[in-house]
Amino acid sequence: MEKLLNIYKKHKEIINYIIVGGLTTLVRWGTTVIFENLFAGFMSEGVLRDVFITALSLIITILFAFPPNKLVVFESKSFRKDIVGIEFIAFISARAVASLIELVGIPLICEVTLMNITVATMVVSVVVLVVNYIFSKLFIFKNREDKKSKKEKKDKKEEKESVGARAKDKLIGSTLMVICGAVALVSISFWVVDTVSKIF
């Protein structure tokens, strides 16, 4: 058990990313299933429907992915407006690039191979998982707070305020994680039910 704990400590970021990335991927698949079933009666099958389903699923997935990546994987704990604003814009921008890969890739795979949208989504999601890690590690969640916290430590008044800010950050972070957990639970449940019903 101690060896496993040491391996986890040594590779914590990558292991956490795989776990969060896996959950994000399941949310992506689950929301695809939800929207595929939701729009089955309203839209006929085809590229337009696939793009619409993919776009809606991507929006929810991106909003889901930000808090656990920020807090759990890259341990960027601050919710100061200047820090979280830069991170969120960079995160959405990077995910938008990855989403373009999905928006083009998934319908293209469906058309060329006649593959089901759910299976095509799974294939493309693996590629996107790797691309998103690289963007997050190198560009998005740089430790911006370190430079600013050195300045804050010089002033005792700001030091006291930062204690209150940390408590507020923990509350915001905890709330976001609970919301993300609920989204994950619902999405994964739909995906599991859909997958099991296709098997049996």
Image (cartoon, rainbow, N blue to C red):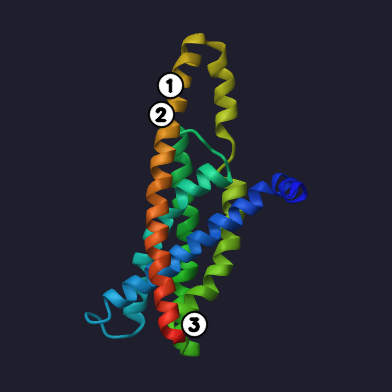
| Disc 1 to disc 2: CB gap under 8 Å | yes
Please tell me the numbered disc located at residue 164.
1
Q: Can residue 190 be seen by looking at this rendering? A: yes
Is 172 on the left-hand or right-hand side of 4? left
Q: Nearer the viewer, residue 131 or 75?
A: 75
Which residue is painted at 77% across and 49% down in the image?
Answer: 3
Which of pointers 3 and 1 lies earlier in the amino acid sequence? 3
Which residue is painted at 71% across and 47% down in the image?
Answer: 5
For badge 2, the amino acid type reads: Lys
Foreground disc of the pair 2, 3: 2
The residue pinned by badge 2 equals 168
How far is mark 3 from mark 1, CA to CA? 50 Å
The residue pinned by badge 3 equals 109
Please tell me the numbered disc located at residue 111.
none
For badge 1, the amino acid type reads: Gly
Measured as percent of width and height from the top left, residue 7 is found at 74, 49
Q: Which residue is at the far left? A: 42
